[in-house]
Image (cartoon, coloured by chain):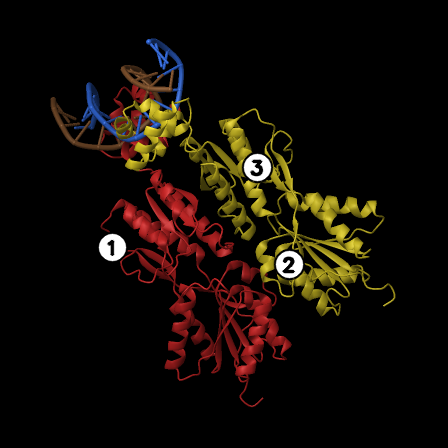
Chain colours: A yellow, B red, C blue, D brown
Amino acid sequence: MRDVAQRAGVSISTVSFVVNDTKPVAPATRARIEAAMIELGYRRNAFARALASSRSSIVAIAFPALEHRLGATAMSIVTSASVAAAERGFNLVMWPVSNDASQLEDYIGSGLVDGLLLMEVQQKDPRVALVEERGLPYLLIGRTEDSSQQDYVDMDFERTVTDAMDHLTGLGHREIALVVGSLGDNTLPGYGPIVRTEAAYRRRVASLGLRDHVVACEQTPVAGRDAARRILDEVPSTTAVIVLNDDAASGVVRGMERAGRAVPDDVSVFSVATSPDVVALADPTLSALMAPGREMGRRAVDGLLDRLENPTVPRTQVLVPCELALAGSTGPAPAPNR
Amino acid sequence: MRDVAQRAGVSISTVSFVVNDTKPVAPATRARIEAAMIELGYRRNAFARALASSRSSIVAIAFPALEHRLGATAMSIVTSASVAAAERGFNLVMWPVSNDASQLEDYIGSGLVDGLLLMEVQQKDPRVALVEERGLPYLLIGRTEDSSQQDYVDMDFERTVTDAMDHLTGLGHREIALVVGSLGDNTLPGYGPIVRTEAAYRRRVASLGLRDHVVACEQTPVAGRDAARRILDEVPSTTAVIVLNDDAASGVVRGMERAGRAVPDDVSVFSVATSPDVVALADPTLSALMAPGREMGRRAVDGLLDRLENPTVPRTQVLVPCELALAGSTGPAPAPNR
DNA sequence: CTGAAAGCGCTTACAG
DNA sequence: CTGAAAGCGCTTACAG
């Protein structure tokens, strides 16, 4: 920067004003400085800037590294977040933090980032209290028990269930079951997506005067096969199943076929909040409402950066609906007397 | 740091020596300083340190953001890389760069990182020349045409094919086909994994005195079904198929079953270099050699950081073998006279 | 083993 | 519209 100033015959202050567009500079002066910058291949040093201004133009995304493997939806959130950050001149760093939030303290202490995105948010999330206490701006990807006073971007589970129900009732289905994931031993008390989806399903079913039928199963194809059998045992007249359980969805289709029900001729199977890989790998093709990972990552970054630029902006509280993907495993309800 | 020094009754130099463990300090002095640090909740500022020492303890991982969606293997590389970096006191930042390498120049120019990991490396990769020119330490996750003079961590395709062949010939199979991915219109001239795998397959088949049979198909389940049919049309006596094409693998199984061949009783299907999600979602269960994403991410970070700490360390040139996962879709070769 | 001092490359009141 | 100067919080020869 000193070299640029010298070459342009100005002070380094003025160069700084041009680089950051932070004060008015005479057109002629600006032109000389810009020319000098190009000739010298000037790039402003990220650290000097951060040290002097105490803004780093770096945000972090915290994710639980050890608990469970993150899939294609998480990847699309991360990649789209980093693209969105880059577009606004920010860098995105990955912070693997165990859920007890201990390491998070060290990360924050380094002062590296201007703000923080929290992935895989739990209903009661210890990380939130910590970040709040430290005064670091943050935004949730997901929601806590009560996120009314927080910035967040989450999937719109309510809308997703409603869309799924509408799709199926529009095709004439009246006996519609819901398959959700169970979390095995380490059952989290009320994992948000499942709680929200199940509640929305029950409300919708009730308002339509239909019967509710919820089956939980583990997140594997084999468990999905069992779930299909259980559904038919309990309500043989079932003609449609909504599946909020990516890993089990293909198994539900298989289970129906093994029970002698053709998909979609006898039974429709509709996978919701579905990861891109599930659709890509499904054979036969699944009708699905896809998790909008790309959109969520982008909205999350935009919401956080908006707040960094202006702490008084209105809260970002966005629910992103799922996107309808394909329609190979749903069809009209079979005629009543079959 | 000034506060710590004052409280401990020493100079800030001495505090720095303790913080970085960079010069011998008398035990008593050290104890006083450490106590002061705890009392004051001292954390060293990342930027000041970086500015003064011109080492940032940040490395970047560059990935192509727009070209294609990254799946679960890429996610496991990224998450394990960030964990490994954290263990050594480093941060990992995500750099989405288009393949033409234009943005990469700006990223590097900011001076933010000490080193760079390159994902999704092409046979001829324009990013490599750029990074080389800038003198930034880097390590490839993958390989170029000739990586003999570069640090890299890649999947061991040769070994993977050999392992798969051994597994199948051990079960008595003699007619073994290979399904690879085709890349549609934008056929990259020699996408590394496919080139390497196909070559290794042909060598192995030749050395065993068997017939080679390679089929390329698009990366979808439907294309996999067609590929299965094509295999049987061309060589009806085929009893085993190795699939290097994640998205098509389930389709190959389906295609065999539709052609009246039971899996694994009549035909074994063995998916190799397989992503975690493929195995998690497969129904029926696939025998697979799993892509070692976790291991690759960790080894890549270790290799890069080793070089940063000591530029004269031997090159990291590591090929990580795939891990055997399951065995539901492979079995003994059927008896000859059936 | 410890300290005084220069300097890393910027930003930002303050003054003109 | 432009500049002189202080300072961001460290590291690192250099000296003792």
Taking the view exactly as shown, the residue that stands out farthest to the front is A28
Q: CA distance from mark 3 to mark 1?
A: 43 Å
Chain of the residue on which disc 3 is drawn = A
Residue A330 visible in the snapshot: yes
Q: Which amino acid type is shown beneath numbered disc 3?
A: Leu
Q: Are marks 2 and 1 on the same chain?
A: no
Residue B264 visible in the snapshot: no
Q: Residue at x 76, y 51 (%)?
A: A165
Q: Residue at x 53, y 50 (%)?
A: A70
C1 horizontally vs A81: left or right:
left
Please name the residue that numbered disc 2 is placed on. A248
Q: Secondary structure at mark 1?
A: loop
- Give x and y (percent) for residue C5: 19, 20
Q: Are marks 2 and 1 in contact (CB under 8 Å)?
A: no
Q: Are marks 3 and 1 on the same chain?
A: no
Please name the residue that numbered disc 1 is placed on. B314
Chain of the residue on which disc 1 is drawn = B
Residue A140: which numbered mark, if any? 3
Q: Residue at x 50, y 66 (%)?
A: B245
- Give x and y (percent) for residue A24: 41, 22
Q: Which amino acid type is shown beneath numbered disc 1?
A: Pro
Label 3 vs 2, first from the N-terminus? 3
Q: Secondary structure at mark 2?
A: helix
Q: Which amino acid type is shown beneath numbered disc 2?
A: Ala
